[in-house]
Image: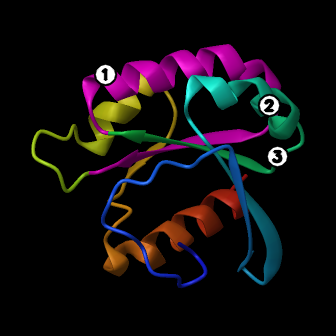
Amino acid sequence: MLQGRNVSKEANPTVGLEIEDSNLNGKKINIWDFGGQARFRFMWQDFLRGAGLTVLVCDSTEDNIKKTKDIFKKFSRYMDTKIIAIANKQDLPGALKAKKVQKKLGIPTYGMSAIRLDLRDRIREILEYEIEKD
């Protein structure tokens, strides 16, 4: 998404792991996108150690927020860095607002709709802000 590639409007979950190189604030960064399915979670703890920023992305539904909170509780001991959340799919009817998701997760949360190209700059700004923030 940060590299200017086309974003599919169809839901295509990450399978396993995708790695993308990018630049934020003039710094080269690596973005690691882990598949959220339970069968891929065995590898998460090894990759989470030493991360500069962990971003949990969840759909803005009660069920998905609960699953994300459970994942956060299970893996937070491996996350020795700043953690934020993205409340995705804000464009869908019935989506919980980012502030409500934040209250449920207990970590800073930003609203997003990943398929909206006009929000590509917003996600970049969020990441730049959080990486630079103390």
Which SS class for mark 1? helix
27 to 89, vertically: above or below: below
Nearer mark to the viewer, of 3 and 1: 1
Residue at (83%, 76%) from the top-left corner?
A: 28
The scheme the figure's colours follow is rainbow
Q: Which mark is residue 120?
A: none
Q: Earlier in the sequence, mark 1 or mark 2?
A: 2
Q: Do the residues labelled 2 and 3 touch (CB within 8 Å)?
A: no
Q: What residue is disc 1 on?
A: 63
Depth order, front residue of 17/49: 17
Distance (Cα) linking label 1 and label 2: 24 Å
Residue at (60%, 46%) from the top-left corner?
A: 15
Q: How crowded is mark 3: few (under 14 residues within 10 Å), some or many (20 or more)?
A: some
Distance (Cα) linking label 2 and label 3: 14 Å
Which span is picked out in magenta? 60-89
Q: How crowded is mark 2: few (under 14 residues within 10 Å), some or many (20 or more)?
A: few
Q: What residue is disc 2 on?
A: 43
Distance (Cα) linking label 3 and label 1: 27 Å
- Residue 119 quadrant: bottom left
Residue type at mark 2?
Answer: Met
User: Residue pushed farthest left?
Assistant: 93
Depth order, front residue of 16/50: 16
